[in-house]
Image (tube, rainbow, N blue to C red):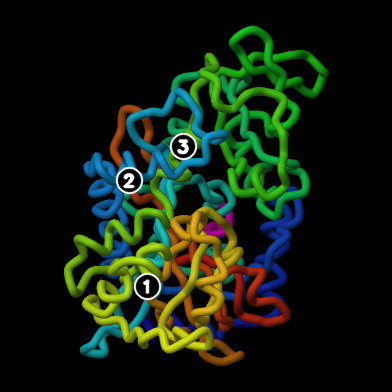
Amino acid sequence: MIPELRTRFNQEFSPDRYAKLLALLQERCRVPVEFRVAETPVFVKKAMMDEMAGAGCQLAKSLLGNSSYLEAARQAIPVQYRVSGEEGHPHFLTADFALVRDRAGRLTPKLVEIQAFPSVYAYQAILGCAYREAYGLATGLKRYLCGLDDTLYWKMLTKTVLGKLDPENVVLTEIDPAHQKTRVDFEVTARKLGIAVVDIRSLEAVGNRLHYRNGKGKLVPIHRIYNRAIADELMAREIRLPFDLTRRWDVQWAGHPNWYFLISKFSIPWLTREAAPDSVVPPAVFLDEFLEGDGRARLRAAGVDVPDAAGADTVYPMLLLKPLFSFAGKGIRFEPRQAELEAIPRERRHDYLLQERMTFVHNIETPCGLTQAEFRILYLWPEDGNLTPVLPLVRLGRGKMMGVDHNRNQEWVGGSAAFLEE
């Protein structure tokens, strides 16, 4: 954090400037932002952001180079969601980091989650511009990583989503996109890239191709899908698509659905096995390993304070119970009890992990008190390019969890952006 910039921002803040920020977002996004926008961005030393970005790249590449891991992860994909036509690498990646104190008391990043799935790439770029304009932030503060600017960023995002195809034949698919909280990102993406936003349930199969209907009702062939439909939601809502997702269609995927599973929370126990003592990876094991194998011993060996299981009421205050395939923090249990763990059917225990609980450092001074930040690094990986960290996304909160749903009825929390100083 950069104290002098934090102090100056707080001194110069006014409700009118925050109102201007929200008005700019409404004007430029053209639809309401349906999640809370934080009053403030954060100001971070570029070296720390580069450290996070580099760690995410290293972890992703280690997973992609581990054939045993990939085979195990592929077997964990539910059969009905094993989609054909998987490419050699994901097009999108996000890595979430907390800031914690290490044993020496230094502020250091720690991985929260890594996921090969798109995030709000378009909206986040608009948000950063709006912060700068509304608050008159110095042009010398950078927003992008790897030397990118607005022009280069949009060029790379366009290339990653479209490939080399005509925008008319590329669609962004989601479940009921008009009613998703991330609708604002869909609308900005559609306008900037010239593609249609389509409910995945409305796609029509003709022969070996998928089609959508444009604004005039014309049936248009789809050559590439920018996939934003989360498999967890499809499963939770028991949605039956009008086409067989596992069949090999004559279509490209920008963000192939399999990668949602292949680089996910499933990877963290695997990364733990090879992690050095000072690794950014928090120790984690699968639930079946903890209850029926050597998982408890491995967590202790990694330095986690895990009590013996004395009975059903034994509590594990330093652990989180996480379902492997869920989004927005759904299903996470803090301080799980032995009885809760054993209540999960034996055949389902491999679908959960137990991970060391991290203590986020509250180090951002605001008029409402100290606030904590979670940093998400957004990566792009076009077909003929490299895995590239492009833009940080920030979530501010004071609750147990960092999602906007877990910080309601509070101020100086919510979705935010980072400005970087050399």
Q: Residues within 10 Å of mark 3 (few under 14, many from 20)?
A: many
Q: Which span of residues is magenta-colored?
A: 126-130
Above or below — where is 175 with respect to 338?
above
First in sequence: mark 2 or mark 3? 3
Q: CA distance from mark 1 to mark 2?
A: 20 Å
352 horizontally vs 385: left or right: right
> Measured from the top left, where is residue 54 in percent x and y?
26, 57
Spot occupied by residue 422 in the image (x, y as percentages of width and height): 28, 67
Looking at the rendered structure, the secondary structure element under dot 3 is helix
Q: Nearer the viewer, residue 344 or 205?
A: 344
Q: Residue at x 46, y 71 (%)?
A: 374
**Mark 1: few/some/many CA within 10 Å (<14, 14-19, 20+):** many
Percent of width and height locating residue 30:
74, 48
Amino acid at dot 3:
Asn
Kind of residue indicated by mark 1: Val
Q: Main secondary structure of the magenta part?
A: helix
Q: Quadrant of residue 6?
A: bottom left
Relative depth, front residue between 340 and 71:
340
* Residue under label 3: 258
Mark 2 highlights which residue?
A: 388
Among all residues in the image, which is located at the extreme right? 216
Tag shown at residue 68: none
Disc 2 residue crowd, few under 14, some 14–19, many 20+, Cα 10 Å? some
Query: In what element is the residue under mark 2?
Result: strand
Image-based side of 139 in relation to 323, left or right:
left
**Gap between marks 2 and 3, in whole Å?**
20 Å
**Residue beneath label 1, please?**
44
Task: Single out the residue that lies furthest toward the left.
Answer: 276
Quadrant placement of the N terminus: bottom left
Q: Label 1, label 3: how many angstroms apart (C-alpha)? A: 34 Å
Q: Is residue 129 magenta?
A: yes
